[in-house]
Structures are given as C-alpha cells and as structure tokens.
C-alpha cells in the first residue's frame, strides 16, 4: 500500500466556502493536492509547490478525466443553488459525471458534504432533496463514498451566519414566520473541516453516511437571539403563522439583497427539522463538536482577522454587490474604497502611509480630525491626543491617535483599527502594489455597523468621510512623489 502522505487528493469546489478553507488545511498537513476549478488562475496565490490547480467543470464530463487521473481520494464540494429553478437536474447531472469519471480513473474514495435531512419526510425541500440525491448518485457507480450530512454551518462568511447577522444587525423588531422555530443542529465550520480531513484516513469498508451537528439543538430564532445577546443588541421577534417561505423570501430580498437569490432556497430547506438522529459520527470519529455559543464566539473572533486581511481591491472588482451612495455593502458591512496611481515606486509610495498620524497628521482636514477627537473625548473616548510611538517606524499594536495598528506589512499594507467611540467597528486600510513603472495606492474604509444607530452614523457622515478620505489619498500620492511629508 502506498504511503498515505503521497496519495493525491482532489478538491472540487476549491474556490467555494468550504473548499476554500479545506485546501489550505490539507496543504498545511503536507497532502499532495489538486484543485478542480473553472478558473484555476483564481487559486494561483493559494497553492504551493506540491499542489496544483486544473481547469475543469463537473458539468463538462471530458474535463474530469485529466483532473481525476492518479487521484486516490476526491472531495465533492460543489452545489448549484445559484443556477436557477433547474438546480436539481443540474446537480444530478454533475454528480453522475463525477461518479463515472471517478470510477474510470480508479479513485479509491469520494468524500461528499451534503445536507442533514430526514429522507422519509414528504415535505422535504427541493434543496435538501437534491443534496440527498447527489449522495445516492455518487454511490451508484461503485466508488466508496463517505457522505457527511450537516445542519446549519456557522462560520465567518457562511451563508447561514451572514443571513443571521444581517437580519439581527438591521432589524430591532422582526415579524418572524413559523419556520424560524424549526429545530436545527448548527455546527461550526472548523468542526466540519475536522470531519472532512479525518475521513481521508477513515478505516471503513463500503459506503458510509454520517449525520454531523454541533452540541446544541436550536432554531434559527434561537440563533438570532444568541447572536443579538453576544453583540449586546435587544431584538424583538413577533411570530406569525401566515408568512410562508415564498413571502419570507420576498421579505429577505428587501432586507438582505446580497444573499437573497441563494437565501430563498435556504429558507425552503428550513421548513423541515435538521437534527442528528444517528450518532455514528461520534462513535467513528474522535471529534467532539463545539456548542453554538463557542461556534459564534469563534466566528466573531475569526471574522475580524479574515475580513481585514482580505484584499478588497480584488473583492470589489470580482463581484456585483448592492451599491448605494454610501459605499459598497457586503452583507451588513460597508466598504468604501478608492485608489490612485503615482509615479513613485512601491517603497516610496508606502513611505507617507507609514508616517501617517501623530506629528505628520492625516494629510487632509486635520482640523476635522481634531474636532472628531474632541467629540470623542466628550463621549468618553480616547480622542486624538495619543500621537504615535515613533515618527517613522510602526509595529502591530502601536497607537496612532484614535487608531491602533492592526496589521503591518511594509511596503504592501497597513491596516488600522478604530478605537474611537462608534456605533460599530471600523478599519482603515492602505494597500500599495506595483503598477508599471509606478505604484497604485488603494485606501479602503471598512465599517461594521451595529443596529440602526450604526447605519445612521455611516450614512449621515458619509459626505464628510468621502471628502476627508479622498483628500487624504490624493495628498498621500502627492507626498510620495515629492518624497517628503506634506
């Protein structure tokens, strides 16, 4: 038998939510990895020497032959919720293509992540029915299949969490339909990944189906209450029996339009319980999933790091988010980004960025910054009088007036986290990258509002923020070309 570490592993859906998190964990464990993607160039910066990305599509059967050649274990992590009303037929066709190609290529095992459901229920939603059908199709062609059926997945960026956060953050009072009280068994994304990784070396014969969930059983309504409690928000929910999933989806489109298209199908699946009835996963795996409270704590802790580390230049150019006069809205977060080109090389373009604050000032409207600091002191905040440790050098954790250095990677990036009194959380990020014989400086303001007061704060002050931030970036570019502070 070959060395397990030398076995080639394939991930489908490597650019998706679960696959995008699984790939780096497998790489960190020294696995030989191949990723199947329609646009493999999107994975180039995530892979290392002993991993590769190949172009292919599960709906394009011939493209799977090359992707599966020499593969020992394949993860099937694709879904078609965003493809329209025919997604069930599309998912079945994709699974059949993959199962046939895997059998032909001699793949030893397929690991599939589906949805937790009771197949015997007559009212099973199309979404969950399709998830179960995909598992059946994968098993039909003879390759050993290990199927995990998960309930609500909680993690920064997961659809379920983003919907919960958007609703709770924006609505102090909610008219909730009957399905909000249907029981589920939420599971942290980190626990899901542990199960998926452990399945690589699972010693079992034949097909296996495992139901996985967290420590607690609770409804979406309970999840929203727990999130509100952890964020210090008071929310009221009024249950009504007449709000059908169809009407709920229309309401969702008004409140959370970024997620509405896929969220409508998610709502359909919530109408039936998704709780673990078979504890085989606890018997066969040495994994003990965390509680909902622990999962939400982990999510809130991780999302700040993941959010500020994201290069919003790529995000803004690769998606089509809801636009407003106050910036670009991603879920419940608001991103205001702008860039400018300068003839200065990256090191010189970054120089005025690293000198920001303190005696140098903020490159535009310093009297407005002082006024903001005065108001902050009246509210019991830190104000603008703290200055900075050193006029030229920075390190993570340094104070910059009413900000603190959150990340520092010269001459590429500086991220500041706001410490003034705000109805929410805010970051200010500067990115510098080479652009021909010069550089491009991108400035991004990131704001995570809390409740209606947070939204009012942003929109009422947005004209001033836009004026100050645009002037700041313009003068930073000018200072970079002059080689001296303004």
Image (cartoon, helix red, strand yellow):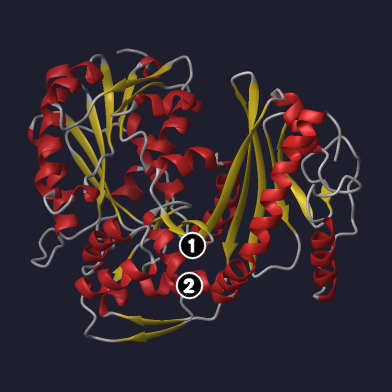
Q: Can residue 136 be seen in this view?
A: no
Q: Which residue is drawn at 19% across and 56% down?
A: 128
294 to 479, vertically: above or below: below
Q: Where is residue 114 in the image (x, y as percent from the top left)?
A: 24, 47
Q: Is residue 442 visible?
A: yes
Q: Nearer the viewer, residue 285 or 212?
A: 212
187 to 89, vertically: above or below: below
- Badge 1, how many Cα within 10 Å: few under 14, some, many 20+? many
Q: Where is residue 358 in the image (x, y as percent from the top left)?
A: 88, 49
Q: How far apart are marks 1 and 2 (CA)?
A: 8 Å
- Badge 2, how many Cα within 10 Å: few under 14, some, many 20+? some
Find residue 252 and report its image quarter.
bottom left
Counting the numbered discs, the total is: 2
Q: Residue at x 85, y 69 (%)?
A: 374
Q: Nearer the viewer, residue 473 or 400?
A: 473
Q: Name the residue under label 2.
A: 170
Q: Name the residue under label 1.
A: 332
Q: Which residue is drawn at 89% across and 56% down?
A: 386
In this picture, residue 36 sits left or right of residue 473: left
Quarter holding the C terminus? top right
In this picture, residue 187 sits left or right of residue 468: left
């Amino acid at each position: 038998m070959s060395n397990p570490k030398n076995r080639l592993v394939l991930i489908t859906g490597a650019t998706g939510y679960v696959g995008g998190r699984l790939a780096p964990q497998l790489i960190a464990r020294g696995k030989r990895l191949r990723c199947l993607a329609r646009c493999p160039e999107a994975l180039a910066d995530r892979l290392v020497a002993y991993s590769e990305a190949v172009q292919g599509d599960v709906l394009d059967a011939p493209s799977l032959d090359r992707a599966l050649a020499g593969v020992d274990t394949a993860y099937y992590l694709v879904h078609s919720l965003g493809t329209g009303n025919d997604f069930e037929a599309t998912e079945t066709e994709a699974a059949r293509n993959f199962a046939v190609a895997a059998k032909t290529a001699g793949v030893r095992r397929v690991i599939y992540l589906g949805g937790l459901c009771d197949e015997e229920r007559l009212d099973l939603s199309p979404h969950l029915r399709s998830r179960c059908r995909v598992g059946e199709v994968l098993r039909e062609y003879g390759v050993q299949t290990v199927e995990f059926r998960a309930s609500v997945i909680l993690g920064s960026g997961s659809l379920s969490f983003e919907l919960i956060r958007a609703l709770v953050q924006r609505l102090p009072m909610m008219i909730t339909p009957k399905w909000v009280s249907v029981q589920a068994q939420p599971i942290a994304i980190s626990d899901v990944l542990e199960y998926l990784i452990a399945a690589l070396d699972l010693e079992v014969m034949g097909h296996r189906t495992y139901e996985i969930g967290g420590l607690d059983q609770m409804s979406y309504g309970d999840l929203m209450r727990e999130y509100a409690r952890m964020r210090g928000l008071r929310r009221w929910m009024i249950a009504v029996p007449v709000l059908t999933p169809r009407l709920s989806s229309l309401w969702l489109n008004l409140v959370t339009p970024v997620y509405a298209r896929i969220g409508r199908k998610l709502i359909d699946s919530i109408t039936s319980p998704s709780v673990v009835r078979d504890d085989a996963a606890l018997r066969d795996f040495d994994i003990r999933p965390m509680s909902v409270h622990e999962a939400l704590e982990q999510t809130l802790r991780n999302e700040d790091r993941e959010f500020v580390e994201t290069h919003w230049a790529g995000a803004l150019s690769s998606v089509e988010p809801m636009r407003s006069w106050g910036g670009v809205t991603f879920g419940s977060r608001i991103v205001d980004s702008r860039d400018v080109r300068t003839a200065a090389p990256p090191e010189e373009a970054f120089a005025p960025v690293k000198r920001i604050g303190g005696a140098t000032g903020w490159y535009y409207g310093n009297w407005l910054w002082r006024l903001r600091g005065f108001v902050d002191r009246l509210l019991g905040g830190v104000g603008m009088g703290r200055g900075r440790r050193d006029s030229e050098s920075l390190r993570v954790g340094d104070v910059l007036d009413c900000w603190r250095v959150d990340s520092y990677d010269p001459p590429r990036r500086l991220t500041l986290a706001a410490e003034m009194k705000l109805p929410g959380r805010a970051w200010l990020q500067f990115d510098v990258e080479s652009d021909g014989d010069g550089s491009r400086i991108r400035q991004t303001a990131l704001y995570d509002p809390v409740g209606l007061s947070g939204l009012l704060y942003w929109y009422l002050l947005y004209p001033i923020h836009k004026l100050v931030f645009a002037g700041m970036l313009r003068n930073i570019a000018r200072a970079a070309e002059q080689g001296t502070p303004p």
